[in-house]
Image (tube, helix red, strand yellow):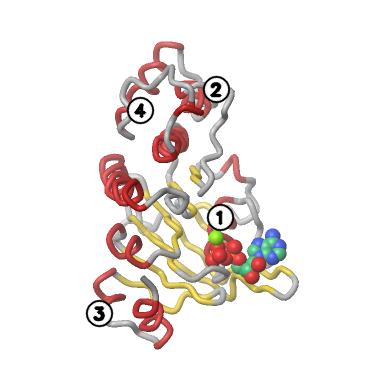
Amino acid sequence: MTDPILKLEHLHKRFGRATPARDFSMTVERGEFFTMLGPSGSGKSTVLRMIAGLEYPDSGSIVIDGRDMTSVPPWDRHLGMVFQQYAIFPHLDVAGNVGYGLRRENLSREETASRISELLTLVGLEGYESRNVNQLSGGEQQRVAIARALAPRPAILLLDEPLSALDEKIRREMQDELRSIQQRTGTTFIYVTHDQEEALTMSDRVAVLNEGRYVQCDRPEQIFHRPRTPFVARFFRGCN
Ligand code: ADP
Ligand code: MG
């Protein structure tokens, strides 16, 4: 076994009366598609933002690839992030948006162009370089955001409900697409969703969160067929 790519140890985070992380410990293996699943307010985004360095824990530690990153700023963590809202730049074309992800790589013009084209092929947008991002569909814009986030070859890609703004049909297409991108690049994905079906179909492992803790962390079949607490059983029965 190689060392895990991520270790969260006893993370604690409080905002006034909310405690989105309570003694939260979790390990993610290299190359995994790992999902944090839970109802709204269970702490998923806060945990993801602490991994990214966008929030700092009150206590506990974050070890990425063997290095203690607990107080390292986000830009030195070598992570990529994709949000629900695409957060792409409307004033740049597709190539400009993806190229932004390469700005710290010191590549020549030719190398940049060929890497952009490779990334666009990866996300199914071959030949889209000079397209205006405002004229792309929601799904296509999210593909651009994914290509930009993967451009610097991050050790981990963090995704916070990246498909929730898309309509049903596109969302299903994108689920398959994301899984395939993850497998082709071998990048570790840490994925946040409140959608049970999405978590079960895409992931290698799923952590089910409730009130700042995870109540079960297991393979999808185990979570579905052997819920370990009444909360998990209800969560899968109640919705959808
Ligand atoms: P989820 O992503 O699972 O919906 P969040 O991590 O966004 O959950 O939020 C968990 C809890 O923490 C909620 O009660 C939320 O209101 C609270 N919270 C999150 N971020 C902040 C913040 N910056 N300030 C105050 N409360 C926050
Ligand atoms: Mg959230």
| Distance (Cα) linking label 3 and label 4 | 38 Å
Q: Type of residue at label 3? A: His
19 relative to 210 in the view: left or right: right
Element carrying mark 1: strand
Q: Which of the 4 image quadrants contains residue 153?
A: top left
Numbered badge on residue 93: none
Name the spot of residue 43 as percent of width and height, x first.
56, 68
| Distance (Cα) linking label 1 and label 4 | 33 Å
Q: Sequence-wise, which precedes: disc 2 or disc 1?
A: 1
Name the spot of residue 117 as percent of width and height, x first.
35, 21
12 relative to 131 in the view: left or right: right
Q: Which of the 4 image quadrants contains residue 219?
A: bottom left
Q: Quadrant of the C terminus?
A: bottom left
Element carrying mark 3: helix
- Residue hosting label 2: 92
Taking the spot 42% from the left edge, 55% from the top edge, the residue there is 190
Q: Is mark 2 within 8 Å of ligand 2?
A: no
Q: Type of residue at label 1? A: Asp
| Distance (Cα) linking label 1 and label 3 | 36 Å
- Residue hosting label 3: 225
| Distance (Cα) linking label 2 and label 3 | 47 Å
Q: Type of residue at label 4? A: Leu
The mark closer to the camera, 1 or 3, is 3
- Residue hosting label 4: 120
Element carrying mark 4: helix
Q: Sequence-wise, which precedes: disc 2 or disc 3?
A: 2
Q: Sequence-wise, which precedes: disc 3 or disc 4?
A: 4
Taking the spot 49% from the left edge, 53% from the top edge, the residue there is 160
- In terms of depth relative to the viewer, which is nearer, 192 or 125? 125
For label 1, the crowd category at 10 Å Cα-Cα, with few meaning under 14, some 14 to 19 and many 20 or more, is: few
Q: In the rendered structure, are the residues bearing label 2 and label 3 in contact, judged by CB atoms less than 8 Å apart? A: no
